[in-house]
Image (spheres, rainbow, N blue to C red):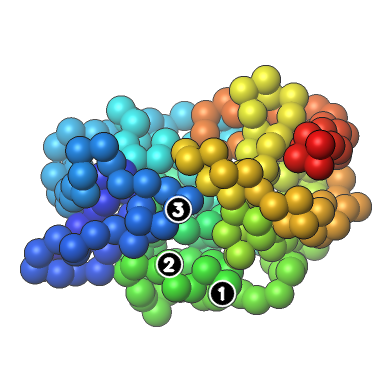
């Protein structure tokens, strides 16, 4: 049976003989059903119309679907002291991409920030030899293709090594996660926040939304809680969710200024 993919969010569902009645992720108010109604494809069909863009993004090897499909996130390979981590996931898997990852030492674990980027995580895990997938337990209900490869973590922080820590930011989703790499990929470290803190177009600030496509702002209380959880982290760079959407240099100060700016705006 095929594993159907939602055309709007790119999430792959468990095998079924026919497409699901609806995509529960897109029916949630943080996302939306496509203007032409609910549409589905399969991984096999997607390979006929799309390929993967494989290139460096500010010094890290990145992977994204080309032309854009669903939400246009890109995955990054992080060569850390916690192993080679594939940060985020995309809907398409190709032999070329798997070979490129293996040439760079392979992948020890897939780590994903939140449900909008779960995409074809199980397909990727299987293609990479059954590597574990690390997700926050608060978002367990959004997993559409369960597998024993998924490992759920709990709490507000999880140290994967001396250099790598996962932080539950919350706000966008209860389990929205950022990854802090203390000494990489360059001196000063970096924060990888998914959509919890989204790098905006000027690439000098971040902002905070409960729903990005539907323009629902994040509650001030959730933003303050996020600010407290990442307080004290040092990072020179922030790597956003898509190509080039990064803050290079002075990023921790830029994030702190963004907290101040957002909270001042929503408080009137």
Q: Nearer the viewer, mark 3 or mark 1?
A: 3
Q: Which residue is mark 2?
A: 142
Q: In this image, 33 relative to 165: left or right?
A: left
Q: CA distance from mark 3 to mark 1?
A: 21 Å
Q: Which residue is mark 3?
A: 29
Q: Neighbour class for label 2 at 10 Å: few (<14), some, many (≥20)?
A: some
Task: Give above or below for 233 relative to 153.
Answer: above
Q: In this image, 78 relative to 265: left or right?
A: left
**Which residue is at the front of the view, 98 or 226?**
226
Circles 3 and 2: CB distance less than 8 Å? no
Q: Which residue is mark 1?
A: 137
Q: What residue appears at the point 52 percent right and 62 percent down from the top-left corner?
A: 109
If you read the primary sequence from the N terminus, does the residue marked by circle 3 or circle 1 appear first? 3
Which residue in the rendered view is the most extreme toward the top?
A: 202
Q: Neighbour class for label 1 at 10 Å: few (<14), some, many (≥20)?
A: some
Q: Position of residue 110 (x, y in %)?
A: 50, 59
Q: CA distance from mark 3 to mark 2?
A: 14 Å
Q: In this image, 41 relative to 114: left or right?
A: left
Q: Position of residue 31 (x, y in %)?
A: 42, 48
Residue 156 position by quadrant:
bottom right
**Which residue is at the front of the view, 248 or 140?**
140
Q: What residue appears at the point 74 percent right and 29 percent down from the top-left corner?
A: 205
Residue 3 position by quadrant:
bottom left
Q: Nearer the viewer, mark 3 or mark 2?
A: 3
Can you see residue 85?
no
Q: Neighbour class for label 3 at 10 Å: few (<14), some, many (≥20)?
A: few
Looking at the rendered structure, the secondary structure element under dot 1 is helix
Circles 3 and 1: CB distance less than 8 Å? no
If you read the primary sequence from the N terminus, does the residue marked by circle 2 or circle 1 appear first? 1
């Amino acid at each position: 049976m095929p594993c159907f993919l939602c055309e709007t969010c790119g999430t792959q569902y468990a095998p079924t003989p026919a497409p699901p009645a609806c995509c529960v992720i897109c029916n949630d108010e943080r996302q939306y059903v496509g203007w032409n109604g609910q549409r589905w494809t399969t991984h096999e069909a997607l390979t006929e119309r799309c390929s993967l863009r494989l290139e460096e993004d500010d010094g890290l090897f990145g992977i994204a679907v080309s032309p854009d499909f669903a939400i246009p996130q890109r995955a990054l390979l992080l060569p850390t002291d916690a192993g080679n981590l594939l940060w985020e996931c995309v809907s398409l898997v190709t032999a070329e991409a798997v070979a490129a990852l293996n040439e760079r030492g392979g992948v020890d674990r897939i780590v994903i920030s939140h449900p909008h980027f779960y995409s074809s995580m199980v397909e990727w895990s299987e293609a990479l030899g059954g590597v574990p997938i690390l997700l926050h337990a608060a978002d367990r209900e959004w997993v559409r293709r369960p597998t024993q490869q998924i490992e759920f973590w709990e709490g507000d922080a999880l140290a994967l090594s001396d250099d790598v820590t996962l932080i539950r930011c919350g706000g966008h989703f209860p389990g929205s996660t950022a990854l802090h790499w203390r000494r990489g990929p360059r001196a000063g470290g970096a924060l990888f926040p998914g959509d919890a803190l989204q790098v905006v177009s000027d690439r000098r600030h971040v902002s905070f939304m409960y729903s990005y496509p539907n323009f629902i702002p994040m509650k001030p209380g959730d933003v303050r809680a996020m600010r407290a959880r990442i307080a004290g982290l040092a990072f020179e760079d922030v790597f956003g969710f898509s190509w080039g959407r990064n803050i290079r240099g002075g990023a921790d100060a830029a994030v702190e200024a963004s907290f101040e700016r957002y909270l001042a705006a929503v408080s009137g």
